[in-house]
Image (spheres, rainbow, N blue to C red):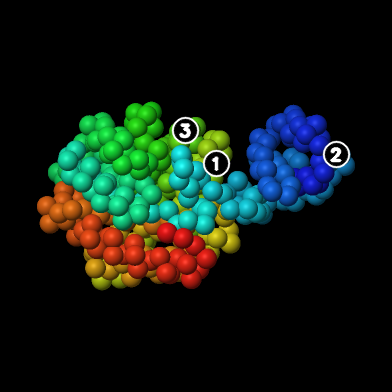
Amino acid sequence: MIIVLRPDATREQKDHVIKKIKSLGFQAHVSEGTERTIIGAIGDEAALQTVPLEAIPGVEKVLPILKPFKLASRDFRPENTIVTVGKEAIGGKRIAIVAGPCAVENKTLLVEIAKSVKDAGANFLRGGAFKPRTSPYAFQGLEEEGLKYLADARERTGLPIVTEVMDVRDIDLIAKYADILQIGARNMQNFRLLKEVGLCKKPILLKRGISATIKEWLMSAEYIMAGGNRDVILCERGIRTYETATRNTLDLSAVPVLKQMTHLPVVVDPSHAVGKWDLVAPMAKAAVAAGADGLLIEVHSNPEEALCDGEQSLKPKAFKQLMDEMRPIAAAVGREI
Ligand code: PEP
Ligand code: MN
């Protein structure tokens, strides 16, 4: 249920509505908009049907949320959510560029890549320290040592870091180092993990599951938000289809579809979608044109020797060129890079 307060509702009236909702056994989630406050009463809606909430002073109207996802829906929050990390933001006018290697491999290489993406204009450094690999014999990541290298690269470049968490047991450790925690495609429906990161104080970058519908994806965002963490960033990274020419099929229509359905920022990862470095730039540009709030791009200074996803990684020079080529496209859609 969405309770829309009158624009002139007082603080006392707002507090009274919240108290009332809680006394009825509901969770109250408040969204303070520029014009008015919306309170989401989350729980079994049927139990609220007989309560005359519109009779409460300060309440303008009461609407059912018909979608299964509530806190993530645009009905609950008409304004776009902007996730801020220090002086960087995802969801505002500037398109956020998250770039870096698939995996953290060693300190020197990471710093070298971090400096190059920073110089090209990236806003965040990415790199996995815990890697979800298809083969148990493939490089699994440097774990805490990798997190330390990420923190060191942040210190040297000022770039906040994005890194994946795969297991509830690692959340505290990763949250100690990372600025944004990534939930990978394979864990999009790991509900225990979603619930736990919902309690975490750091923003969550939630990748779309390999064969997840947009609705399922938003339900996963809802899990995180229901725990109290409102800073969820959605990341389209391609879905599995019958097509084999690319690693996955980038569902670019997900961007405008999500913009209608949710207030959460939407980032596109063309690297994991196409799986081949020379297809990354065209899809990155298309994502900007489609209205993405950010891009996640794998960059490696020596892709041939990369321990993970070298074939889809851009070299620093190609990344810089892509950044330059994306700027006029961003400007054409009223954004900046
Ligand atoms: C990654 O970002 O390196 C990664 C493993 O992504 P995904 O979960 O989308 O496969
Ligand atoms: Mn990767």
Going by the numbered disc 3, the residue's amino acid type is Cys
Assess disc 1: are there few (<14), some (14-19) or many (≥20) residues with their C-alpha within 10 Å of its C-alpha.
many
- Location of residue 315 in the rendering, given as x and y in whole percent from the top left corner: 21, 58
Query: Mark on residue 220?
Result: none
How far across and how far down the image is residue 184, in percent?
Answer: 36, 47
Q: Residue furthest left?
A: 305
Q: Which quadrant holds the C terminus?
A: bottom left
Within 10 Å of the Cα at label 2, are there few (<14), some (14-19), or many (20+) other Cα atoms? some
- Label for residue 56? 2
Q: Nearer the viewer, residue 332 or 278?
A: 332
How far, Cα to Cα, is label 3 from label 2? 34 Å
Name the secondary structure under disc 1: loop
Which of 40 and 106 lies nearest the eye of the viewer? Answer: 106
Q: Is residue 211 visible?
A: no
Left or right of 108 on screen, residue 42: right
**Disc nearer the start of the sequence (3/2):** 2
In the picture of the structure, the residue carrying the numbered disc 3 is: 200
Can residue 88 be seen in the rendering of this structure?
yes
Camera-near label (2 vs 1) is: 1
Q: Which residue is mark 1?
A: 230
